[in-house]
Amino acid sequence: MTDRRALLGRAGEEAAVELLERAGMRILVRNWRCGHLELDMVCRDGRTLVFVEVRSRSRGGLVSPAESLTPAKQRNFLRAAHAYLAAHDAWDAPCRFDLVCVVDTGTTLELEHHRHVELSESVGGGNTSWQPW
């Protein structure tokens, strides 16, 4: 990752934290890792665990932040959430997936918070019916 991309990624995550906290969410952990899997943020919104992916791009890029969440990245996002629930024995907690899109305009960061993002792939189951996989 280039320095410019890394800086934008960090700035996007910081801006996303502020946005989510203003919306009343409590940040539980940032950049949680389990092997090669990572969650940008895990938050609490009331009783609900929220797994948040932050996608940052420069204006005029080849793809938008939302488009950059490819099916392969969605599968890894789901696997990471699965690993988090297993590591914290949190299978009974209601959960959802959110996406924060960050666009660097050159002078400011524009953010969009998408709640209840539907992911295109499944990691399979046997889990309770509320879980989005």
Image (tube, grey):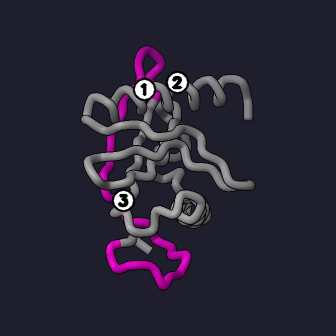
Q: Which of marks 3 and 1 is in front?
A: 3
Q: In which quarter of the image is residue 101?
A: top left
Furthest-front residue in this view = 89
Which image quarter holds the N terminus?
Answer: top right
Q: Nearer the viewer, mark 2 or mark 3?
A: 3
Magenta stretch prevailing secondary structure: loop
Residue range of the region highlighted in magenta in the rendering: 104-130
Q: Is residue 120 visible?
A: yes
Tell me where residue 80 appears, x and y as whole percent. Answer: 59, 59
State if disc 1 and disc 3 touch (CB < 8 Å): no
Residue 110, horizontal then vertical, whole percent: 37, 28
Q: In this view, does 7 lie to the left or right of 97?
A: right
Residue 96 is marked as 3
Residue denoted by label 1: 15
Residue at image point 25% right, 35% down: 23
Expressed as whole percent of the image width and height from the top left, the position of residue 30 reads: 54, 38
Looking at the rendered structure, the kind of residue marked 3 is Arg
Q: Residues within 10 Å of mark 1 (few under 14, many from 20)?
A: some
Q: Which residue is drawn at 41% across and 32% down?
A: 16
Q: Distance between the residues labelled 1 and 2?
A: 6 Å
Left or right of residue 98, residue 83 in this image: right
Give the number of the disc on residue 11: 2
Do the CB atoms of the residues marked 1 and 2 lie less than 8 Å apart?
yes
Disc 2 marks a residue whose amino acid type is Ala
As drawn, is 23 to the left or to the right of 33? left
* Residue 55 visible somewhere in the drawing: no
Magenta run includes residue 115? yes
Task: Identify which residue, 68 or 47, lies in the foreground.
Answer: 47
Please tell me whether mark 3 sits on a helix, a strand or a loop: strand
State the CA–CA distance, disc 2 to disc 3.
Answer: 24 Å
Disc 1 residue type?
A: Ala
